[in-house]
Amino acid sequence: SPPPPPAPAHFNPFLVQMAPITARGLKTLKPARAVRTSRKALTTVAAIGDPASLTISACTAASLFLGRFAFLDLQRDRVAKQGLPVQNGVTHLEAGDKRSVEFEGLFATNDPAGFNLVDLLMWGSVGHAVGFLVLAVGSFKAGTGYDFSVY
């Protein structure tokens, strides 16, 4: 028999779309639906209400909420306790290093609590990591049927 035709260069066989979550748990994974929009273009359709997108968004929103309203004071206290970096008992700025001054624009904010761009990026990345962890555990459980209640 002749060999199969080569796949288009932009086709990603590893793209996986999760099935809807039911009361009994996650169903098995199914590949994302590929749609041919023209003779040459092959695109992948991902819905806005896709469970994977909702999971990542919910975890990111929860992480940002917790970072802003629960952990911001604790984080600021820890940074204040640590202080500036010191070498031989002298801070870098006192030793004459003018480039050791922090860039003020990076920490400027209109938020009353002082939640700035650095906090946004840090807590957002934590939320994304937690969201992907949730998806990975759900995928593992759906694919293998492993019972996590043993531990």
Image: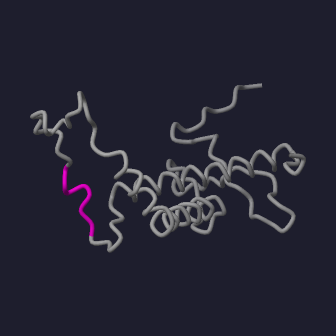
Q: Residue furthest front?
A: 89
Instruction: Work out whether residue 139 or residue 16 is closer to the camera in this orientation and state it.
Output: 139
Instruction: Decide: is 128 above or below 58.
Output: above
**Residue at the spot 40% in from the left edge and 56% down from the top edge:** 77
The quarter in which the N terminus is drawn is top right
Instruction: Decide: is 45 above or below 133.
Output: below
Instruction: Work out whether residue 112 or residue 49 is closer to the camera in this orientation and state it.
Output: 112
Lateral position of residue 68 relative to residue 4, left or right:
left
Picture coordinates of residue 133, whole percent (x, y):
65, 48
Picture coordinates of residue 2, whole percent (x, y):
72, 26
**Residue at the spot 64% in from the left edge and 33% down from the top edge:** 5
Colouring used for the render: one colour
Lateral position of residue 148 relative to residue 125, left or right:
right
Lateral position of residue 105 relative to residue 123, left or right:
left
Picture coordinates of residue 47, whole percent (x, y):
60, 65
**Residue at the spot 43% in from the left edge and 56% down from the top edge:** 75
Tell me the quarter of the picture where residue 3 sits.
Answer: top right
Tell me the quarter of the picture where residue 118 sits.
Answer: bottom left
Lateral position of residue 32 relative to residue 98, left or right:
right
What stretch of residues is rendered in magenta? 103-109
**Residue at the spot 60% in from the left edge and 36% down from the top edge:** 7
Instruction: Work out whether residue 94 or residue 43 is closer to the camera in this orientation and state it.
Output: 94
